[in-house]
Image (cartoon, grey):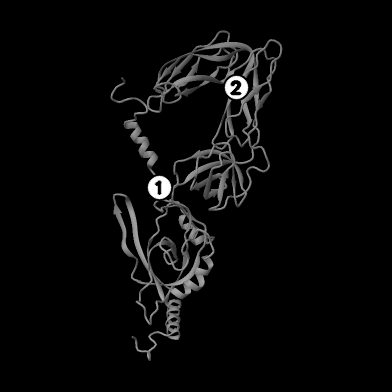
């Protein structure tokens, strides 16, 4: 038995050592932040963490084990690119953790272990503005001085982000992951305004429409449409072609066919149907003819492009009355949701004056759409698809919303609403390519590979 006349570690002696340790850490240490991991979703079979969050950060003093620099292999160049493999060893007070941090996280759900620091939690190291992950907690060094341990030694590695949510409310910490991870970009649209347009009138000799007699093939760009000149004093018609790849063997490499030729200007003063020629565009074989009419639309001019369009609006011409036929047209919009042009598909018959043009309105013509400012890290939800994501960055001037941790596919034209900011906008376009991360070249690599060999286009070894 031990000698009963020696205490071998009384509580007062142990408390003295602990107080001395605490004092030294406060004098020579660095204030770090301890971020406990919240396990949102885990794999029940192998206990793999599927989704986790870091919602709190607690300041605590820590001694840096070496002031000579980080440990580990440092920054290396490998076949996977540039990798930073810095390590960091920190020492924190056992008493300070158990009396200060542990009680604050003890009753929080999904933290699992609160009695001591645990592997997987994060440390924000302010001297380098870096986040480290705890890989091992040593709790028996120094080894039972006066029958007790007084510190935790945290062996950390530089944190590798894998779509975890950091939302501590401390900007210096949260912004460390603002531009890393897989990021999508949404182009949003504000409150919609209906576009407007006017039409000119030609009493006789306009091109009514252009008829495709041969769609040709292998067109990789828009060909030039030539229409023979109108007689002296008349106005020569102008056409524009549209290409389709919705046919067998039509794709980005093989080109497409000419689907239609619409009119930018129906012309005026023709006495016979003009000739139509198709040149350029990389294709061959296309042909078309034109027919002329009297009392028709000449040119459509967009007077206001409106705003908030997620798809091209319908265009309606007023009827000429009697036995006449109303003109028809189609519209185009920009990525910003503005009507840019209206093309004539049929200039109509029997007009005595210029018709009135009606353009359908955008979906979002409400005062509650196109308002608010999205907040960093807040959850946004698509009101049609139900898809959620986290905000990385919101640029008001361009209405570009960068998002991450997306649980599905957003739909163009649906409303997207911020959970905290209540910002509400329409989605114009969805770009699933990562335009932010400079090393995200997966799509570029796939595109280049498809240009070499792509079984979805044709069988390179011959068709059976």
Residue 329 — which label? 2
Q: Nearer the viewer, residue 132 or 361?
A: 132
324, above or below 307, in the image:
above
Looking at the rendering, in which quadrant would you find the C terminus?
Answer: top left
Q: Reply above or below: 288 against 456.
A: above
Say what secondary structure mark 1 lies in.
loop
216 or 233, which is in the foreground? 216
The circle on residue 368 is none
Q: Is residue 63 left or right of residue 56?
A: left
Q: Position of residue 99 (x, y in %)?
A: 50, 73
Q: Which mark is residue 438?
A: 1
**Depicted 350 relative to depicted 144: above or below:** above
Q: Are marks 2 and 1 in contact (CB under 8 Å)?
A: no
Q: Is residue 462 left or right of residue 277?
A: left
Between 328 and 442, the one lying in front of the other is 442
Residue 366 point in image, percent of width and height: 67, 39
Expressed as whole percent of the image width and height from the top left, the position of residue 273 reads: 54, 9
Residue 331 rendering spot, x and y as whole percentages: 58, 27
Q: CA distance from mark 2 to mark 1?
A: 42 Å
Sequence-wise, which precedes: disc 2 or disc 1?
2
**The N terminus lies in quadrant:** bottom left
Q: Is residue 67 left or right of residue 303?
A: left
Q: Residue furthest bottom?
A: 5
Question: Label 2's element?
Answer: strand
| Circle 1 Cα neighbour tier, 10 Å, few/some/many (<14 / 14–19 / ≥20) | few
Counting every numbered tag in the picture gives 2
| Image quadrant where residue 282 sits | top left
Few, some or many C-alpha atoms within 10 Å of disc 2 (few <14, some 14-19, many ≥20)? some
Q: What residue appears at the point 64 percent right and 40 percent down from the top-left corner? A: 191
User: Image point 61% across, 41% down: which residue?
Assistant: 190
Q: Quadrant of residue 427?
A: top right
**Does residue 369 sit above or below 326 in this rendering?**
below
């Amino acid at each position: 038995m031990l000698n009963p006349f020696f205490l071998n570690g009384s509580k007062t002696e142990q408390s003295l050592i602990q107080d001395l340790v605490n004092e030294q850490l406060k004098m020579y240490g660095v204030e770090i932040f301890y971020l406990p991991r919240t396990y949102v979703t885990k794999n029940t079979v192998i206990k793999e963490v599927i989704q986790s969050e870091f919602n709190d950060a607690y300041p605590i003093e820590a001694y840096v084990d070496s002031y000579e620099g980080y440990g580990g292999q440092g920054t290396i160049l490998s076949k996977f690119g540039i990798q930073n493999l810095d390590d960091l060893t920190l020492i924190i007070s056992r008493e300070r953790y158990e009396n200060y941090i542990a009680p604050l996280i003890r009753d929080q759900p999904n933290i699992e272990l609160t009695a001591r620091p645990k592997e997987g939690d994060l440390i924000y190291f302010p001297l380098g503005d870096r986040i480290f992950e705890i890989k091992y907690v040593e709790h028996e060094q120094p080894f039972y001085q006066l029958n007790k341990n007084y510190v935790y030694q945290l062996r950390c590695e530089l944190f590798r982000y894998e779509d975890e949510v950091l939302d501590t409310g401390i900007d210096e910490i949260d912004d460390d992951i603002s531009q890393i991870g897989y990021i999508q970009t949404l182009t949003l649209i504000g409150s919609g305004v209906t576009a407007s347009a006017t039409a000119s009138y030609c009493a006789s000799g306009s091109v009514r429409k252009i008829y495709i007699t041969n769609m040709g093939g292998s067109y990789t760009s828009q060909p030039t449409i030539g229409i023979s000149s109108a007689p002296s004093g008349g106005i020569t018609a102008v056409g524009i072609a549209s290409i389709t790849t919705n046919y067998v063997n039509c794709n980005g490499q093989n080109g497409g066919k000419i689907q239609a030729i619409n009119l930018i200007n129906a012309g005026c003063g023709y006495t016979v149907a003009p000739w139509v020629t198709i040149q350029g565009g990389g294709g061959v074989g296309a042909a078309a003819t034109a027919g002329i009419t009297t009392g028709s639309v000449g040119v459509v001019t967009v007077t206001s492009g409106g705003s908030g369009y997620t798809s091209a609006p319908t265009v309606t011409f007023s009827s000429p009355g009697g036995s006449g036929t109303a003109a028809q047209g189609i519209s185009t919009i920009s990525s910003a949701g503005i009507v840019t042009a209206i093309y004539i598909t049929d200039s109509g018959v029997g007009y005595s004056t210029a018709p009135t043009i009606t353009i359908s309105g955008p979906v979002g013509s409400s005062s509650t759409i196109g308002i608010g400012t999205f907040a960093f890290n807040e959850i946004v939800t698509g009101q049609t698809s139900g898809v959620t994501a986290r905000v990385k960055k919101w640029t008001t001037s361009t209405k570009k919303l960068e998002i991450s941790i997306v649980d599905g596919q957003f739909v163009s034209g649906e409303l997207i609403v911020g959970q905290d900011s209540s910002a509400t906008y329409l989605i114009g376009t969805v770009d699933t390519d990562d335009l932010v991360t400079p090393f995200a070249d997966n799509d570029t690599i796939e595109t280049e590979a498809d240009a070499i060999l792509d079984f979805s286009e044709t069988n390179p070894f011959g068709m059976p």
